[in-house]
Image (tube, rainbow, N blue to C red):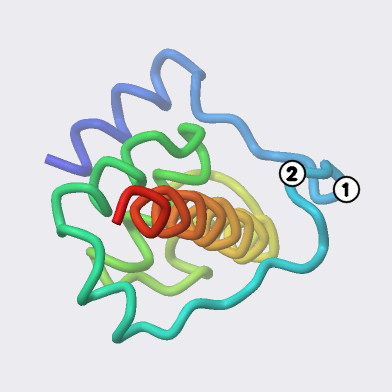
Amino acid sequence: MVNLALDHLRKKRQLQEISLDEEVLPEETEELPQQEIRDSIPESMLLEFVAELPEGYRTVFNLYVFKDRSHKEIGEILGIKERSSSSQYHRAKQLLAKKIQEYTRYEKGRG
């Protein structure tokens, strides 16, 4: 299924390389302990956060995390540089960490 989606994106030329110098988030993102994340956020919410990532970030994240592909393999699959894959994965993690922090703060405020 992932391969079909990637082929579709490649044909439509919608899968674009993200510039390495693009500013996405502030440099520092507070890390939350993994156990806290597992205990406080439903898996469906985490998957929703992944689905909300920009297309390039989401594609790289899914291939790296769920399909266990290396950045070299991802680069070959998507026609991007290995470093771009690594950068997009890192930025995806930063965006996810930000969403998790916001969700956690919101849930603590409700409780």
Q: Nearer the viewer, residue 68 or 33?
A: 33
Return the residue nearer the eye: 41 or 53. 41
The amino acid on which the numbered mark 2 sits, given as a three-letter code, is Val
Please state if 35 lies on the left or on the right of 106 as rendered. Answer: left
Q: Nearer the viewer, mark 2 or mark 1?
A: 2
Tell how many labels.
2
Residue visible at 50% across and 29% down?
15
Judge whether 8 appears above or below 90 on screen: above
Residue at the spot 50% in from the left edge and 19% down from the top edge: 13
Dot 2: within a 10 Å radius of its alpha carbon, few (fewer than 14), some, or many (20 or more) residues?
Answer: few
Image location (x, y in percent) of residue 76: 49, 56
Return the mark for residue 33.
none
How packed mark 1 is, by other alpha carbons closer than 10 Å (few <14, some 14-19, many 20 or more), is: few
- What residue is at 54 percent from the left and 44 percent from the top? 79
Q: Do the residues under discs 2 and 1 have CB atoms within 8 angstroms?
A: no
Mark 2, residue position: 24
Q: Write the residue at 49% across / 77% down.
A: 32
Q: Residue furthest top?
A: 12
Instruction: Pinpoint residue 95: horizontal percent, then vertical percent.
Output: 56, 51
Image quadrant occupied by the C terminus:
bottom left
* Apparent side of residue 10 relative to residue 3 in the rendered image (left or right): right
> How far is the residue under mark 2 from the one under mark 1?
9 Å
Instruction: Give the amino acid type for the residue marked by disc 1 in the picture.
Output: Asp
**Circle 1 — which element?**
loop
Q: Is residue 52 above or below residue 94?
A: above
* Mark carried by residue 21: 1
